[in-house]
Image: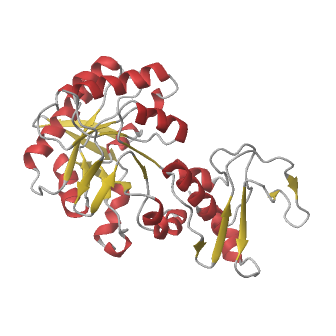
Amino acid sequence: MKEAPLTQLQTRAGIIPFPAYIPVTTFGDRYPLDQLVRPYLSRLASAVMVSLHYARPLAENPEQRPRLPVLVDSGGFASLFDDARISEENGLGVLERIGEEQTERLHPCDVLEFQEQHADVAFTLDFPIPPKLAESEGARRLELTIANAHWALANRRRRDLALYASVQGWDVESYRRCAAAFAGTGFDGIAIGGLIPRAKDRDLLFGIVDAVRAVVPGLPLHVFGIGQPNLVAELFEHGVQSVDSSAYVQLAAQGRAWGATGSGLLHASPSERLHLALHNLATACKSSLPLSARGVAFNTKPSGSYPNAQRSDQTPDRIAHPPTLYLVSCHSRQRTDSENTGATTMR
């Protein structure tokens, strides 16, 4: 019998309709552009994704939480950093960050405890397997990823917390084997990690996705970190229900719009970066762009190139009046010193 299509995920904070492009955000004050975008997330997206490290400020500042389902990743990506070490304790994988004065430890228990307090959708602590890693170490990481997921499922207390098992691997067969360990065990979804460095090999990428989809046909399938709209559309065609990405805001921090060619806006102001981020996110989510934002009205045309871009005598080293995107102020005013310098602190 053919499986019924997966059309949505019910969470305690609301429904996430599928397919879903889920923007990655941060909390706290490290990335000012994320703070500017945050009030508009509920207008453009159905949920947000945040890594455990950048979700921690929610404990002290719950008012930063958007009116959307919040997905909290485990933070296992940090295992790729130079100061990271993966150790085994009682059969579980523990991530350690070795500092000059102290060592930070991330145990599956730490991850689950935070997620049960602050998340609507949670992802188990996994350890990415980069290309060219020794196969023996890759196999060790895979087994610890599987063990951590089963531990989280067995110890979850909140039944309204949707729990996704994170899947890792290095080739099609290893990804299939990892996913098969979660089939029929009670997880609410499956999330595939480690695909970003493999995304250029489309045959491998879609082979992995198809293999995982085949062994867990009845569960929502999420892909970590891939956000290019055309590639996302292909992933949805291969049975993926959701993806997450911060590319929309990273491009905006560089003064760039999705689909536009050329160098973009050089030395973009905070309001221009906000405009670009909202445009990029609306493009990815296929949403309507908000018509107003903090006293600034935005008008967005379809993405394209910057034909006839020219330098402005008033604003040297910037592209003047790019026809793909333009910003119309609701009231004219001088740019403040904080606007001129603030952009350099964003992402």
**Nearer-the-camera pick, 303 or 118:** 303
Up/down of 178 relative to 298, above or below: above
**Nearer-the-camera pick, 82 or 152:** 152
Residue 235, picture quadrant: top left
Up/down of 220 relative to 210, above or below: below
Relative to residue 18, is residue 201 drawn left or right? right
Q: How many marks?
A: 0
Q: Position of residue 89 (x, y in %)?
A: 14, 38
Up/down of 159 relative to 84, above or below: below
Q: Residue at x 86, y 60 (%)?
A: 316
Q: Position of residue 14 (x, y in %)?
A: 28, 62
Confirm whether residue 226 shows in the render: yes
Confirm whether residue 138 shows in the render: no
Q: Position of residue 27 (x, y in %)?
A: 40, 64
Q: Residue at x 42, y 60 (%)?
A: 26
Q: Position of residue 72 (x, y in %)?
A: 30, 54
Up/down of 214 relative to 80, above or below: above
* Extreme residue in the right direction: 313
Q: Residue at x 17, y 39 (%)?
A: 148
Quarter holding the C terminus is: bottom right
Q: Residue at x 23, y 22 (%)?
A: 177
Quarter holding the N terminus is: top left
- Please, which colouring scheme is shown? secondary structure
Relative to residue 120, is residue 341 drawn left or right? right
